[in-house]
Image (cartoon, rainbow, N blue to C red):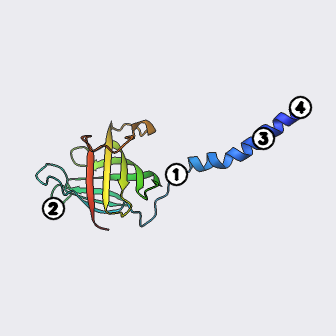
Amino acid sequence: MKAGKILLVSAALLFLIPFAAKAQEKYVPTANEEFYGVWMCRENPDYNHPQKSVITADGYKSFLHTSDTAPQEEGTMVIDSKWTDSDGNIWYKILGTVTTGQWKGYNFQALEKLTNSGTIKESVFQPIGLGTKFSPKYYPLTIDPSKPTYEIRYREGS
């Protein structure tokens, strides 16, 4: 009887180990990640908010005006996870750190959604503070246009 329980538990563990290992894998972005590119804010151009963002594998640069050549802010962005929903939209969880500008040193976590066409990006970010460690608990749960950190951007280039 004891041997039967051990065999049953062992079989269950052997079945579950591949799933646990897969869940712990870190997402490794590709060189041509859909998230990378030039993203423009078309709403309310008079608002004191970056109108252009350039996102690459090395991080991001935000420009207050589309014609600016010097970024208002720069930072790092690490893709923590990526998935595709049933409508073909691509979702990302992002870990970011501001490296220049007014918020230098601040960490943030973001939930990003790219439409299935890859031309519209909506996001909500959660500032987590100066040097605060990243944690899954800080991710926004939804992309809510009523949130003050909501953004909608349109792809202008790669």
Residue 90: image location, x then y, percent:
41, 56
- Upstream in the sequence, badge 2 or badge 3? 3
Residue 35: image location, x then y, percent:
37, 59
- Upstream in the sequence, badge 3 or badge 1? 3
Which label sits in the foreground, 4 or 2? Answer: 4
The type of residue carrying mark 1 is: Lys
- Marks 3 and 4: CB-CB under 8 Å? no
Compare residues 50 and 40 and report the one nearer the observer: 40
Above/below status of 18 relative to 148:
below
Which label sits in the foreground, 2 or 3? Answer: 3
Which label sits in the foreground, 3 or 1? Answer: 3
The type of residue carrying mark 4 is: Met
The type of residue carrying mark 3 is: Ser
Q: Mark on residue 1? A: 4
Determine the residue positioned at 26% across, 56% down: 153
Q: What element carries label 1?
A: loop
- Marks 3 and 1: CB-CB under 8 Å? no
- Upstream in the sequence, badge 3 or badge 4? 4
Whole-angstrom CA distance, mark 2 to mark 3, is: 62 Å
- The residue singled out by tag 2 in the image is 68
